């Protein structure tokens, strides 16, 4: 009887020890798993913040360069106004407008014609003011073709062509057709000028991955 009792007690102790060991192993496994998950989370979080900080530094440096360039550009434009030679910063801006202003183009051609002593019979072109681009991230010059029919003496027509070339707003003569008499000549001229949409400085959001 005593021997059986001792054996039963030892078995009970062994079973309890096994339970304790199993519980310890399970608890250790859980702790290790949580440690691994936590470590990976902290590692990924660190990489993410590192990437965010890197992009912030790039944005900061870009902003500083843009501010410096803006100040330099402002200074260069001020030089036109201070030169006193009749060319102002607004004159430079008028050379390549930022809007597809067709009425202003027609007015400019009419003024050149009057200054040259010729008469404008017609100005033909497309007024795309409502559909033309107004701004772009990377703007490029956009062609504005227009056909002008003028008449006058030969010398005045020659002066009109010269004044087109001397205009603040550049004009390129793509085609020229002349007809008429010695006294009155009619010239049909296909002209091309340009405008450039304003640069788009819209701030955009960018998702940064790890």
Image (cartoon, rainbow, N blue to C red):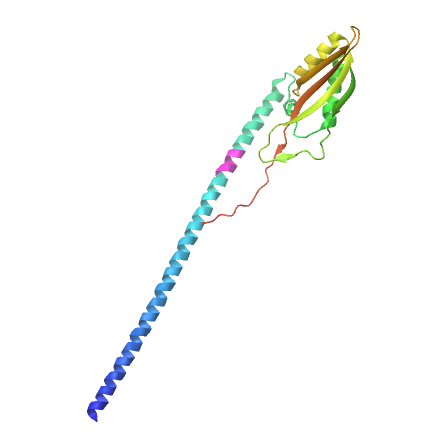
In the rendering, at what x and y percent does residue 183 appear? 80, 6
In the rendering, at what x and y percent does residue 115 appear?
Answer: 75, 14
- Left or right of residue 116, residue 203 in this image: left
Please name the residue shown 37% across and 63% down the image.
Answer: 33
Give the quarter of the image for residue 153. Answer: top right
Query: Height in image: 86 above or below 210?
Result: above
Q: Is residue 168 above or below residue 139?
A: above
Query: Does residue 65 belong to the magenta stretch?
Result: yes
Q: What residue is at 47 percent from the left and 43 percent from the top? A: 55
- The quarter holding residue 117 reads top right
How many numbered callouts?
A: 0
Q: Is residue 34 visible?
A: yes
Determine the image quadrant of residue 86: top right
Q: Position of residue 142 (x, y in %)?
A: 64, 28
Q: For the magenta stretch, what is the residue range?
A: 61-66
**125 magenta-colored:** no
């Amino acid at each position: 009887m005593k021997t059986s009792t001792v054996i039963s007690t030892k078995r009970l102790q062994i079973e309890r020890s096994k339970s304790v060991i199993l519980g310890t192993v399970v608890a250790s496994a859980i702790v290790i798993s949580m440690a691994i998950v936590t470590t990976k989370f902290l590692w990924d979080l660190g990489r993410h913040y590192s990437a965010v900080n890197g992009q912030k530094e790039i944005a900061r440096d870009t902003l500083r360069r843009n501010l410096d360039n803006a100040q330099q550009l402002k200074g260069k434009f001020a030089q036109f106004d201070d030169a006193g030679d009749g060319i102002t910063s607004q004159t430079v801006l008028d050379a390549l407008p930022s809007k597809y202003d067709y009425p202003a183009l027609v007015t400019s051609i009419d003024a050149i014609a009057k200054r040259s002593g010729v008469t404008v019979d017609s100005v033909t072109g497309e007024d795309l003011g409502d559909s033309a681009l107004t701004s772009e991230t990377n703007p490029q010059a956009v062609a504005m073709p227009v056909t002008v029919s003028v008449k006058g003496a030969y010398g005045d027509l020659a002066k009109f062509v010269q004044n087109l070339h001397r205009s603040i707003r550049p004009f390129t003569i793509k085609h020229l057709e002349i007809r008429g008499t010695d006294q009155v000549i009619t010239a049909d001229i296909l002209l091309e000028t340009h405008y450039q949409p304003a640069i788009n400085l819209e701030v955009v959001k960018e998702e940064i991955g790890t």
